[in-house]
Image (tube, grey):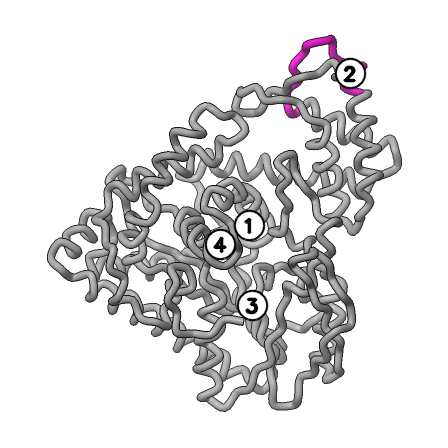
Amino acid sequence: MGKIKYVIKRSGSTVPFKEERIANAIYRAAVAVGGRDKDKAESLAKKVIELLESNFEEGCKPQIEEVQDAVEKVLIENGHAKVAKEFILYREEAAKRRKADSLHFSKPSTYIPWKKVWRSLNWAVEHGLNTIESTNERIRKGEFPDIVHESESYYEDQLDTAAEMIKERSDSLKMVMVSGPSSSGKTTTTLKLEQRLEKKGMSFVPLIVDHYFFDLELHPKDEFGDYDFETPQALDLDLINDHLKRLAEGEKVLIPYYDFKLGKRHLDQTPLKIEENQVLLIDSLHGLFPEFSRGIPAEQKFKLYLEPLLQMKGNDGEYIRWTDLRLIRRMLRDSVHRAYNPEQTLLHWHYVRSSEKRNILPYCSTADYTINTSMPYEVPLYRPKLLSSFNEWAEKYKDDPLRIDAYNRSKRLSSVLSSIEPVEDDSPVPGDSVLREFIGGSTLEYD
């Protein structure tokens, strides 16, 4: 064991000091600029430890900023300027986000599609679904099936609008990108959009972006053994760009195949070509990320952004957070389709949010159209499914400084779900609803 046993976080809490966290941070910065050498990251981390131990006495507890300063110094002095720049940039962006979070009442966030939010709020007020209490009143009156119908109709109307906009540009389009943060409903929306456009005479070829993941061993991993698949750098962006450009020019490409069981990618597997009357259809977290399609002219792509922009205020006067809705959706989906129990999803969510804030949300304003995929009726359905679990997790993690994010989310959602009227019967929910992607029972066929 070295001199340094603990480090003090920005929150003031004291947590164990672990060398692998430094190696992981260096490797993440390297990955962001195209590096994939884990041994080098570990070697540099050892130099950071040596520097820290030369500067601090036995038993000293350095601040997290002091550790990060040491990382920057070692990277620069050892000839890794590009990685150091990325590390510094990440620190600066994180600091800006923290400052913006603390000032969110004084300055509107650029991460929010405000026009869509205002329309969604107006709709919620008109339908008596803008607060938990007003929603509860309608449920008590036996109006849950009506709420479902009204919510689904609003979503379907938005799909109709998106389909019309795409059709109007069909002469020049080569690809349609359906993007948005995790569990925003991309899979269902893509299928339903494709159905509409086929009726309008358009033909689509799907591109499954997951096949462009790098091998699992090349992904960063934290001290909990958790891999980060949420960053766009988890994908081979250079290969994606090469294939998109060639497909847009009418060439045939060989798509890779990713074996998720083994965590291995196999190159040049499946032939793909876009015929003259076809359009590429891409469902991806990172469709709006500039590097994803940097070589494709704007007129050749239509970018659709999805997010559950629920406008429902809780009894505490705060609006239900969209990220909390998506967390619940992902918990339910992962437990069925990915052998993840809900608690694992909760503990992984810090990766999801970190990547979203840096790589997805800042680009939502570049979309050609935004669809609000929230369903006000989903909140009462979640209470009987997860309330007891959130109560348990809030108690379990309340004194764990390494799990502050899990504790805060659990406590917040425990309060929200406790205040909503529970609904256990989901039979009024249509089989092709976007919500069926998460609660199960969909009549749509997902690949």
Q: Distance from label 2 to label 3 (Cα)?
A: 48 Å
Other residues around mark 3 within 10 Å, as few (<14) / some (14–19) / many (≥20): many
Q: Which circle marks residue 53 in the picture?
A: 2
Mark 3 and mark 4: Cα distance apart in space: 18 Å
Task: Using the image as rendered, state which of residue 445 and residue 132 is in the foreground.
Answer: 445
In which quadrant will I find the N terminus? top right
Mark 3 falls on what kind of element?
A: strand
> Residue 319 versus residue 13: which sits nearer the camera?
13
Q: What element carries label 4?
A: helix
Tell whether label 2 touches label 1 (CB within 8 Å): no
Tag of residue 173:
none
Residue 440 position, x and y percent, is: 39, 63
- The amino acid sitting under disc 1 is Glu
Q: Which of marks 1 and 2 is nearer the N terminus?
A: 2
Instruction: Please name the residue that numbered disc 4 is placed on.
Output: 334
Which residue is found at the position 53% from the left and 56% from the top? 338
Query: What is the x, y in percent for residue 103?
Result: 45, 36
Residue at label 1?
356
- The circle on residue 283 is 3
What is the span of residues highlighted in magenta in the rendered image?
51-65
Q: What residue type is labelled 2?
A: Glu
Q: Give the mark nearer the N terminus: 4 vs 1.
A: 4
Crowding near pointer 4: few (<14 within 10 Å), some, many (20+)? some
